Image: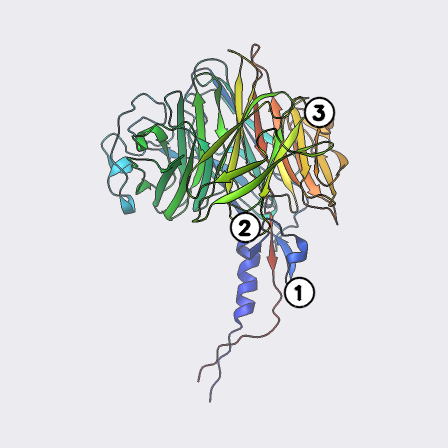
Amino acid sequence: MKRTMMSLIGVTVALAAVTGVAAVATPGGGADDAPRGGSRLPVQRSALLCPAPTSSEVGETAYTAFAPQGAAAGADGKKGTAQLLPAGTVKDAGGTDGGKGKDKGKGKKGAKGGEGGAADSAAGQAVPPRDTKPVVPLRQAGVPVTTTTDSADAPALVGTADGTLAPGWTVQQTTSVAAGAGRGLLGLDCTAPDTTFWFPGVSTATDRQDYVHLTNPDSTPAVVDLELRGKDGALAGSAGEDISVPPHTTVPVLLSTLTDTPATNATLHVVAREGRVGAAVQANDSKLGSDWLPPAADPSPSVVLPGVPKDATSVRLVALAPGESDADLKVQLATPTGMITPAGVETLHLKSGMTTAVDLKDLTKGEAGSLVLTPSGSGSKVPVAAALRVTRGKGAKQEMAFIPATRPVEKRATAVDNRGKDATLSLVAPEKGKDAKVKVTASAGSGGGTPVTKTYTVKGGTSLDAAPPRPTGLKGSYALTVEPESGSGPVYASRMLARPQGGVPAFTVQPMPDDRGSVLVPTAGQDLSVLTD
């Protein structure tokens, strides 16, 4: 008898080290989740997608790229590379050109497999970018790189990082629009491609123009379904099925063209049935300016929304229980001195599949905090998705931003494009009795400066807002990296940028979830061999 033996575990470990597809750190997990005898290794390849920033003629966008130091060199000893390339653009499912909102008539749906609809209609062919040169190429870890553009037709960007630059690779686009309906400060961490996204807080009302930007990083078409859920469930007249996103292109979809029912508060669910996409929502309000709404963390029984500014004049919570069961939640605000319950909103009942919106008004009362939603009943474990719309200013001088529920910082999180004194760091330790201790590092500046590190302790059940450390001799912009220390309790983070514009308190808030820059690779415990005669 002849025996041929193949060690399946050995093959699995090798693939994990090369591609980074082993057990990735998950919310609530940490280093202790590693299999016995396993090890945590840095990922060796990352992908990010940046949507087209603005169609305004008076907008200016800065792209900032950064990779934290600390990843070991690859087996071949080569340093990593990281860059973004312009993507093509197709007309959206509502018939508008590149998301500019010139035509609100409905168009055909994209067809499965990339045939027909938005991708292939006469007016919807992919438009190649004007320039195919790399954008914000990164050559070394620890120092951010910034590129700016004032083009009204700047394309979406598709890119990858590998080797030493892949773990924690972060790119942010920050856009300042001086005037017009979309005026304000818009900030977004470029997203990783995935197959599902949740966006509580979108709107199809007449005073809002919300576009979801779908970007395909791969060489095969993606097919996407868009589902909108309002206060009574799925919105009527939905036209968001089978939207084709051609390879290496972006499709902006005006949400109001997908339904016959205007909804001030709704939840968008993006599902890629074929392939994968990056997704982000750009919201333009006729009175409150504009900003990006990032995807919320995957639905969970408990969610944390970090970083409500102390001078917020209006806070609106939008939440959904997407499953088949209703959810009952306890609503609390983590403040610097402890947990408090907002007056009149002690608990929140979410009907299954129906979006609920609650006006929390001036929730913080001059004291910054973070919203924490937990099951109100001991046996309730119904997952929920949630986000906040936060407004600063009054009258005609108001500006809005969004804070979605975010994942905890397991190992490391990064926020880039901090300049001078414009940044506020928010940290929250939501569990009483479990203090969080984190190391915050301000990187070297893009034009020079020496990194600075500071340690913060956040008492369990409280939040902390602070002016973060800045590099010594700062020139240009810098990155902030948050790393929980050994033994720290759970911690969530966000960063606010405040850059006033002519009396308008323009601002934007970016959640800081774990960067998932490492994978857990199990060590072969036994030889699961395949035996053949």
Which residue is the extreme one toward the left? 122
Comparing 142 with 177, the one in front is: 177
Front: mark 1 or 2:
2
Q: Earlier in the sequence, mark 2 or mark 3?
A: 2
Q: Give the residue drawn at x 52%, y 76%.
A: 529
Vertical arrangement, residue 26 with respect to residue 257, above or below = below
Which residue position holds label 1? Answer: 36
Q: Secondary structure at mark 3?
A: strand
Marks 2 and 3, how far apart at CA: 47 Å
Q: Amino acid at mark 1?
A: Arg
Categorize mark 2 by other alpha carbons within 10 Å: few (<14), some (14-19), many (20+). some
Q: Give the residue drawn at x 63%, y 54%.
A: 41
Marks 1 and 2, how far apart at CA: 29 Å
Q: Which mark is residue 474?
A: 3
Quadrant in the rendering for residue 521: bottom right
Q: Give the residue drawn at x 69%, y 33%.
A: 443
Q: Amino acid at mark 2?
A: Lys
Q: Amino acid at mark 3?
A: Leu
Q: Which mark is residue 381?
A: 2
Q: Earlier in the sequence, mark 1 or mark 3?
A: 1
